[in-house]
Amino acid sequence: MKRSLLLLCGAVLLSGAALAGPPAKGAPARARLILVGWDGADWKLLDPLMQRGLLPNLSALVARGRTWNLESVNPMISPLIWTTMATGRSPVDHGVADFQELDPKTRARLPISGWSRKVPAIWNVASEKGLKVGVVGWWATWPAEKVNGFFVSDRASPVLFPPEVLSGSPALTWPEGLAEGIRLVGRREGSPGFEDVSAALRITKPEFDAAVAAKKGLADPITGYQKIVGSTRVYARTALELYDREKPDLLMVYFEGTDEIGHLLARFYPPKLPNISEEDFRKYGGGVVAYFQEADRILGEFMKRAETAGANLVLLSDHGFKWADRPSYYSSIQFDTAFLWHESPGILAAAGPGFPPAAARGKAGVFDVTPTLCRLLGLPADPGFEGRPVAGLAAGRLPAAPPPVPWTKTFKVERLAVRSSSEVDKAAGEEFTKKLISLGYLTGAEAAAVDARPPERAGTETAGTFQNIATFLRGRGQARESLPWYRKALEVNPNSPTALFNFSGALEVLDEWDESDDALVAAARNGYHDPEAAIYRRVAAYARRGEKEPKSRLQLVKFLRKAVSAFPESLRYRASLGKALFEAKECAASQTIFRDLMARNPRDTEALNLMALTSWCLGDVAGASDYFGRSLAVYPDQPAVRGGLGELTRSGGGRPPGSTR
């Protein structure tokens, strides 16, 4: 099998490389770089595993080179961040900000593609500067791009795409003839058998067979693990065989499994979480370590090649994962809570001629990645880069740094031509959507939403695209600049609970309370995952402000009236409105609410106590005494109520606490 890919596509590779022509004049001195991407990798997991001796290759890389915490950005969306690390630009500039895009003609949801990227990537620059490049599996790289070397798009993955795409796409690879070899590797490596899976998960053969027959994919720990490991091996085998044949100056290979394994199995990782059964913990608790040992084995293969070629090797991730403080009761595979398992920073580790060893762990950010790669390869930076090369590089071992040039004006991106979307593509998009739902990145409601824009304003951007760009800006303190992007998201999907919720948060920061409250209530009404928590966080915010700004109490009343109107069946919201009215000295309106609540449940001590307080506020001393007494009869252990009753008796009907007549 090892030579199968080479036998199928060797001649095509040679002819494809010839199409690129000779190296450009003024090409930088030869420098080689292998970059390995581990999505979601986190030092909090990796450091303990290295200390236990379970990741020998990563340990060797760290010992020979140096490491950094790599600060991420919000939202921690993989296509967004990996495109930033390939282009050096923000999602506002590069345009890749969601897992999906819309077909401009049919409005169908399709997997995010390279057509959404508006700027060149480093492989385009390196290729035009005469370096041979190889790209394997990078996010948002279909259709394949014509480079001086080889290019395997992200649609080669057997995890996120059904077989129809692998057999039907004419733009899976560059050169195009490589696709047959990739398909062969996918068939042979993409579905590990029982022996491989049971080495990681404590399952029986009948359990494995039943899971495979059920075809639940990423929704099941067994078939999910099988698919993740299979995808990892496909990309690894592809990248290694092509590297061995072509010896590119720049190899960039991406592995999504290091993040997917967290979403699939982190809840089973030791120590046991309280909501995980002993049986599931026994079966699946070892899967995470087993997968990372597989990833470490593959890393070792790239390290051998880097050492042989005298190349620099860089390992990095887009963000971290909450291994140390996993959220026990928030699902890692449910939309609106999956993101709660992501955190910053990610990892950066490097060794080779350009990286003098250092024990101390440094700090860098995702915007520093592309400038660092440019410096290592002697490529011109873009004046629009926000980041800079990481500190500590061995400048004397690197090519000279050329002057910056604007990439968009200087370098071109040439993608393979593809036909318009077919029924096969539509089916593939639907399958991809299902897998995004399985991984917790999309809800069924979001997936079913129809683009609400009029035809003349329709585009390829989803509501998520605009929302994620807005959230990126808001996370950088640019709340005012984020508002137009949130409005664009709501133009695409006016009912998106996540867009409404985040829009509300940006307006809150800007003290635009009325519109913020409207958006928050709409988010809760349209299916936000934890509506009561969202509503009561806003209540708490108003309560804190009310201590210094009395007008905030009136705003709280307005907000709760909106919540009660949206959720008339919620007795809790009605009770909260009643208390807010009492604190705002609107005692008659408050009493109307609590009289109804008391009628529904005569033993509701909160309603009885508020009836007493509002009666006292309105001058009905006898009524106040009666309601306090009835409350104490239900639950005698209420010192504050007994104190209030005593004060009422002593004062003969003076003001109740917190209000006036």
Image (tube, rainbow, N blue to C red):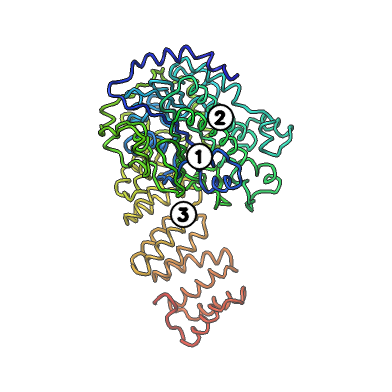
Observer able to see residue 575: yes
| Label 1 packing within 10 angstroms: few (<14), some (14-19), many (20+) | many
Which of discs 1 and 3 lies nearer the camera? The answer is 1
314 left or right of 385 in image: right
Between disc 1 and disc 3, whose residue precedes?
A: 1
620 left or right of 96 in image: right
Q: Are marks 3 and 2 in contact (CB under 8 Å)?
A: no
| Label 2 packing within 10 angstroms: few (<14), some (14-19), many (20+) | many
For the residues marked 1 and 2, what is the alpha-carbon distance in whole angstroms?
24 Å
| Label 3 packing within 10 angstroms: few (<14), some (14-19), many (20+) | some
Pointer 2 residue:
231
Which of discs 3 and 2 lies nearer the camera? The answer is 2
Amino acid at circle 3: Ala
* Residue 344 % position (x, y): 45, 48
User: Which residue is drawn at the image coordinates 74% and 32% (left, top)?
Assistant: 206
Pointer 3 residue:
534
303 left or right of 102 in image: right
Pointer 1 residue:
61
Point out the residue furthest to the bottom here.
650
* Residue 550 % position (x, y): 34, 68
For the residues marked 3 and 2, what is the alpha-carbon distance in whole angstroms?
38 Å
330 left or right of 86 in image: right
Q: Secondary structure at mark 2?
A: helix
Amino acid at circle 1: Leu
* Residue 21 % position (x, y): 34, 15
Reply above or below: 107 against 323.
above
Amino acid at circle 2: Ser
Q: Secondary structure at mark 1?
A: helix
Residue 19's image quarter? top left
